[in-house]
Structure formats: structure tokens, C-alpha cells
Amino acid sequence: MNDDAAEYPRALEAYLCKKNDGHLVRIVGPAFEQVCGWAARGIPINVAMRGIDRYFERYYAKGPRRRPVRIEFCEADVLDVFDEWRRAVGISTWDKASALSADESSAPRKDSLPAHLERVVARLTALRGGEDRSLDETLEAIVRELDTARAGAKALRGAAREALLERLRALDETLLAAVRERTDSGGLRALEQEADTELAPFRDRMSADAYAESRRACVDRLLRERARLPVIALEL
């Protein structure tokens, strides 16, 4: 294996060590092959790290940790996060089912519309209490509208429900646009370079138009992560 290919498992080994409070769990043998398989599928390393983070969040939620986490335990979350990333940036060539055989009952359930609105309002309200107050006006207007919408969301059906879902998509775009306007050109260029790195394994398979669309979506996702924005649109 060349140095570039070996760097991927080494970087994840170091990241896992950090997440395990300095306890080193080597990525060797079958675990090494598993992680190399992630790299071969084109899973960006920061996406794999977010999958590891997701496993640790669940692990901590169960109470005090009893033993260091091994990388093998994180695979389902890594593949889930990659699947979400892939859909967000418009890449549809990866078949999750062929990569992981898992119990469907263990898959996270989608929020109901009222629960989704409640979660988004809570996240946006927390953002308004942060140090950066540049989005306060936009956040206040969105929170006010969502607060009104969630009061009757449970009873919505048919066209009325679809109209609300469309409005959520529009509000999501409004919030992202506000963040983009407040990001300097140097910051945007850095995000575009990061997007290019994430998409590099797939670029040769994509047309110029498809790549440009995926790159824009990837930059939007990175903007959202940097600003800690919730997704207002509800994915069905």
C-alpha cells in the first residue's frame, strides 16, 4: 500500500485515539481492511470522522463508558453519514445496501412534522443566544413563523401539508443565503476547496453540470456545519 492510501486509516486511528481520551486502539487486520474499504468507496475522511462522532454521541448517551471504542463499531454510523452526505451533494452511484448488511429496525426513524418543527425551533433559538448576533433578525423571523406553523402541523393533510413542506424548503434556502452573504470571499474559497477535496473521488464519473451542482450543494452543507444550522426542510 502506498503512503497516500495508508494515510486514511492512520488519520482515523489518530482521530479514534483522541475520541477515546488518548487510549490507542490500533486499526490493524480486518479493521484495517474495513477502513481501507471506506477509502476505496470514496468516503471523505471528514465524513468518516462525523460518523465516528455520531457513534460516540450514542455511546455517551447510554451512560459512563466502560471500554475504548473500536473502529469496527462505528461502521454503521460512518455509512449512514456518508449516505446523508451523498444525497445532500447529489451523488447517487453508491449502493449502501451492498456495503453493509444491517437490521432495518436499527435505522433511525424520521421525525414527524411537529417533532421536526419543535427540534428546529429549539436549535434556532439556541443560535440566537450565541455570540454571533449578525443573524438575529433572520433567525427571529424564521422562529416566529415556525412557531406559528407547528401549532397546527399535526392536523395538516394533502395540499396544505405539501405547502408547508415547500415553505420549509424556502426558509432553509433563506437562512443559508443569509449565512453565505455574511461569509467573506476567503472563507468561501476555503469551503470550495474543501468541497473539491470531498468530491474528488467522484469527479471523473460526473458531467461538468452535475459536478457544479454537487459542488454548490457541498459548499452549502459546509456552510451549514460551520454555522451550526439545523436543516429546516423536512426530508421524507
Image: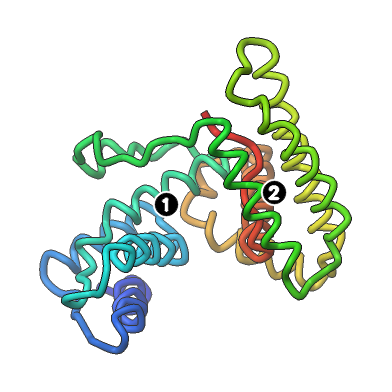
Residue 163: x, y in percent? 72, 20
Q: CA distance from mark 2 to mark 1?
A: 19 Å
**Residue of label 1:** 81
The residue at the far bottom in this view is: 22
Location of residue 42 with respect to 107 vertically, above or below: below
Closer to the camera in the image, 88 or 201:
88
Task: Tell us which disc is closer to us: 2 or 1.
Answer: 1
**Helix, strand or loop under label 2:** helix
Amino acid type, label 1: Val
Amino acid type, label 2: Arg
In-image side of 182 versus 119 (left or right): right
Q: Residue at x 64, y 37 (%)?
A: 233
Q: Residue at x 34, y 78 (%)?
A: 19
Location of residue 208 with respect to 14 vertically, above or below: above
Q: Residue at x 70, y 62 (%)?
A: 127
User: Quadrant of the rendered structure where residue 53 is?
Assistant: bottom left
How would you rate the neighbour count of disc 2 (Cα within 10 Å): few for under 14, some for 14-19, many for 20 or more?
some
The residue at the far top in this view is: 158
**Residue of label 2:** 216
In-image side of 219 versus 101 (left or right): right
Mark 2 vs 1, N-terminal side: 1
**Helix, strand or loop under label 1:** helix
The residue at the far left in this view is: 29
Q: Residue at x 19, y 80 (%)?
A: 26
In-image side of 204 versus 74 (left or right): right
How would you rate the neighbour count of disc 1 (Cα within 10 Å): few for under 14, some for 14-19, many for 20 or more?
many
Closer to the camera in the image, 129 or 229:
129
Location of residue 15 with respect to 98 vertically, above or below: below
Residue 108: x, y in percent? 36, 41
Residue 34: x, y in percent? 21, 60
